[in-house]
Image (cartoon, rainbow, N blue to C red):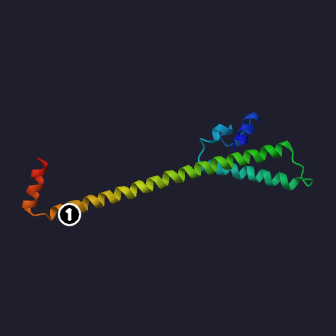
Amino acid sequence: MAEMFEKASRLNLRFATNKGNLTTEDLWDLSLANLNVIAKDLNKQIKASEEEDFLKTEKRADTELKLKFEIVIHILNTKKAEQEKRELAAEKAEKKQKLLEIMERQENASLEKLSPEELRAKIAELT
């Protein structure tokens, strides 16, 4: 993976987008939807170049195109995994909060069942 990004920096790769040419570093700031559009476009270019070359000789442009595609897919997958991790953490936090609220209600309900004498005893313990 590091080799892939080293090649990108040595080749000064630029990615054509509707926002202009972006560097590899700029891709990390894009949304998943934008990365998906770039990946689809690169994939179309790769398929078109493979269809036209009947000798299957790989040109430098083809190599760079495939490298660009690999980079975009790597960044897209990494960002997607990070998003899923954040969503899972938020889901867990929400469930935990609900459980804490239920526990608090149950504790309050059990306190309400105490007799006045038992309540006075608990109050006395706190003072």
For the point 39% across and 58% down, the residue is: 95
Q: Does residue 13 show up?
A: no
Please state if 28 lies on the left or on the right of 112 as rendered: right
Nearest to the observer: residue 103 or residue 15: 103
Residue lying at the far right of the rendered structure: 55
User: Mark 1 = which residue?
Assistant: 109
The answer to whether 46 appears left or right of 114 in the picture is right
Q: Image point 65% across, 40% down: which residue?
A: 19
| Relative height, residue 123 to residue 16 (above, below) | below
Res. 8 in view? yes
Estimate the x, y position of residue 108 in percent, counting from the top left: 21, 60
Q: Position of residue 90 (x, y in %)?
A: 44, 53
Q: Residue at left 61%, top 42%?
A: 28
Give the camera-side residue of 25 and 112.
112
Given the image, on which type of amino acid does mark 1 rest? Ala
Around disc 1, counting alpha carbons within 10 Å, would you say few (fewer than 14), some (14 to 19), or many (20 or more)? Answer: few
Looking at the figure, which quarter contains the N terminus?
A: top right
Q: Please name the residue shown 28% across and 60% down the image.
A: 103
Residue 15: image location, x then y, percent: 71, 41
